[in-house]
Amino acid sequence: MANYTIIGGDGKQYGPITGDDLRKWVSEGRLNAQSLAKADSDAEFRPLATFPELSDAFAPQAAAPDSPPSLAISADWLERDYELDIGDCFSRGWKLFKENMGTLFGAFIVAMLLAAVGISIINAVLMLLAPKIALTSPILRQFFNIALQAGVAVVMGPLFGGLYYIFIQKMRGLPADVGDIFIGFKKMFSQLFLGNFAVGFFAGLCMIPYNMTQAAKIEPLLDQMRHASTPAEMQGVLPELWAAIFSTLPVLLVCMIPVTYLGVNWMFTLPLIIDKQLKFWPAMKASWKKAHQHWWLLLGFVVVVGLLNLAGFCACCIGLLFTIPIGTAALMFAYETIFGESQTR
């Protein structure tokens, strides 16, 4: 019986494995027709679809009526440990973006335009519907912010889900185009909405002390500046405004500690929903569990992404149009390393 060596989704070689094991991995979604492999007698790797003896592995099969999704939580990736090479993720992310720039850049631009329009409309509608006291009372303003988060999640959850789907497909050598940006509205919409909202909601709770402090110290001074009748009056408020801003910085820094902690723990929530077809809460728990295995390493990854985007911002902001997609591609390679199925047990 022939044995095979395969190249997994993380770019590493695994094997040798038997043909039966290979067929099993295909049925589990860990390999596809474009995955590279070679038999013992082969000198080079080639797509699995080119092996005649494996053609039956890619034949359409009817799903059992009550069988669970093939992309459900797997004890394999949920329990195993992982090694994450940050530099390799960014190197492969840059290569992926360069080789698929039309699709990935186009999808990112479409997503950002739709997000800008959708959020603007939602904000305008809520501003019209909310009573004036809800915008002036610091306490009621927090409820307004929650409503705004929910409205934003309706747009951003499915949009980011679609964007991650496109990057994941391209990363795995599978077909995807700009139109797939809408797949989050067609598949797993409610879970993508809930996942985005839940992460934002908990982060928002952590920011309440800062929001209340800002409302008490900064917003009254901004209101004075808006109603100033002369430039001299505006100049007179500026020293107080700067003093108020600096006085709130310690509160902001303290609030950012739990926000950062939660953000790193839940950074893979939406990719897990769109890729593994998980419900939002299992996706959040799975992301939390895996992030905790190497939390500081993932924090370092987030810092590198932030520095990359800071460089893009310094390049007249235009650089962000390229650094954000590259960072997203790197994030998807990190996701594949941690949660991908194409690894040995």
Image: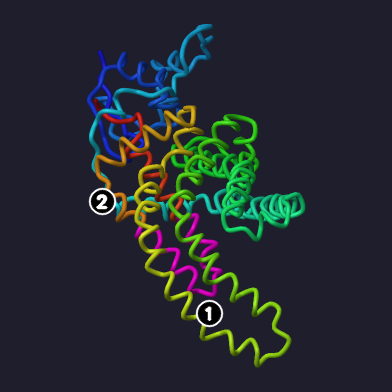
**Is 130 situated left or right of 209 in this image?**
right
Queried whether the magenta region covers residue 94, the answer comes back as no
State the image coordinates of residue 52 (x, y, percent, origin top left): 42, 18
The residue sitting at 65% across, 89% down in the picture is: 233
Residue 323 part of the magenta segment: yes
- Secondary structure mostly taken by the magenta-highlighted segment of the chain: helix
- Which residue is at a point 40% across and 17% down the rendered structure image? 54
Q: Secondary structure at mark 1?
A: helix
Magenta-tinted stretch:
303-326
Residue visible at 35% across and 34% down? Answer: 339
Q: Residue 57: which quarter of the image?
A: top left
Whole-number angstrom distance, CA of label 2 to CA of label 1:
36 Å
The residue most toward the bottom is 232
Q: Look at the picture and state if 66 lies above or below 80.
A: above
Mark found first going from the N terminus, 2 or 1: 1
Residue type at numbered disc 1: Leu
Q: Amino acid at mark 2?
A: Trp
Considering only vertical position in the picture, is 289 above or below 333?
above
Q: Which residue is mark 2?
A: 296
Q: Which residue is mark 1?
A: 241
Q: Position of residue 324 (x, y in %)?
A: 49, 58
- Depth check: 65 or 176 in front? 65
Question: Residue at left 30%, top 56%?
Answer: 300
Q: Height in image: 80 above or below 206?
A: above
